[in-house]
Amino acid sequence: MAEDYTVPGSGKPSGRLTTHVLDLQRGRPAAGMRIKLYRMVEGGARELVREMSTNADGRTDEPLLAGEEMRAGLYELLFYAGDYFRETAADAGFLAEVPVRFRIADPGAHYHVPLLAAPGGYSTYRGS
């Protein structure tokens, strides 16, 4: 995503949250994987912020968060890997859902959370 995002009315760059999912079994982007983004709230509860699916490039068509939506705090991305592998392969494999909890400390920064997934395991990291 090469687009620049700005805070409305300010002209200042804003932060954004993006993701990218790669299907390691097939060696290509994981198109059509459902993703939910939650904000963790008081007492450990989750508040649903957004639900999207990945496009043909394994990315979402727009950032998961951008501009004024970016707030400091604890978040969880929930990737529906089991559904994806069941629809694209013979079975869903070992994984059902992959939760990734992370903290946004600087709402003005770009946070990228890639997922490298196969039916039997996954890896993630803070990308750029």
Image: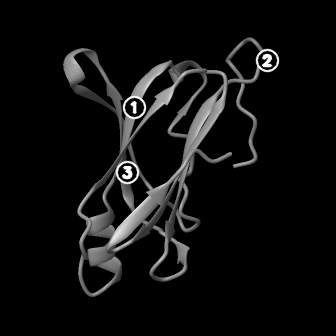
Residue for badge 2? 11
Amino acid residing under circle 1: Tyr
Residue for badge 3? 35
> What is the x, y in percent for residue 18?
57, 44
Image mark count: 3
N-terminal label among 3 and 2? 2
In depth, the one of 48 and 108 nearer the eye is 108
Image: 107 above or below 115: above
The residue sitting at 64% across, 27% down in the picture is 15
Residue 75 has which mark?
A: 1
SS at circle 3 = strand
N-terminal label among 3 and 1? 3
The residue sitting at 20% across, 17% down in the picture is 43
The residue sitting at 74% across, 42% down in the picture is 3
**Direction from residue 119 to residue 113 in the image, left or right:** right
Image: 119 above or below 103: below
Amino acid residing under circle 2: Gly
Q: Residue furthest right?
A: 11
In three-dimensional space, the C-alpha distance between marks 1 and 2, rounded to whole angstroms, equals: 27 Å
Residue 121, picture quadrant: bottom left
Instruction: Nearest to the eye among marks 3 and 1: give it.
Output: 1
> What is the x, y in percent for residue 83?
27, 67
Name the colouring of the figure. Answer: one colour
Q: Residue furthest bottom?
A: 90
The residue sitting at 53% across, 63% down in the picture is 58
Instruction: Nearest to the eye among marks 1 and 2: give it.
Output: 1
Instruction: Nearest to the eye among marks 3 and 2: give it.
Output: 3
**Direction from residue 27 to residue 94 in the image, left or right:** left
In three-dimensional space, the C-alpha distance between marks 3 and 1, rounded to whole angstroms, equals: 13 Å
Pointer 3 with pointer 1, Cβ within 8 A: no
Amino acid residing under circle 3: Ile
SS at circle 2 = loop
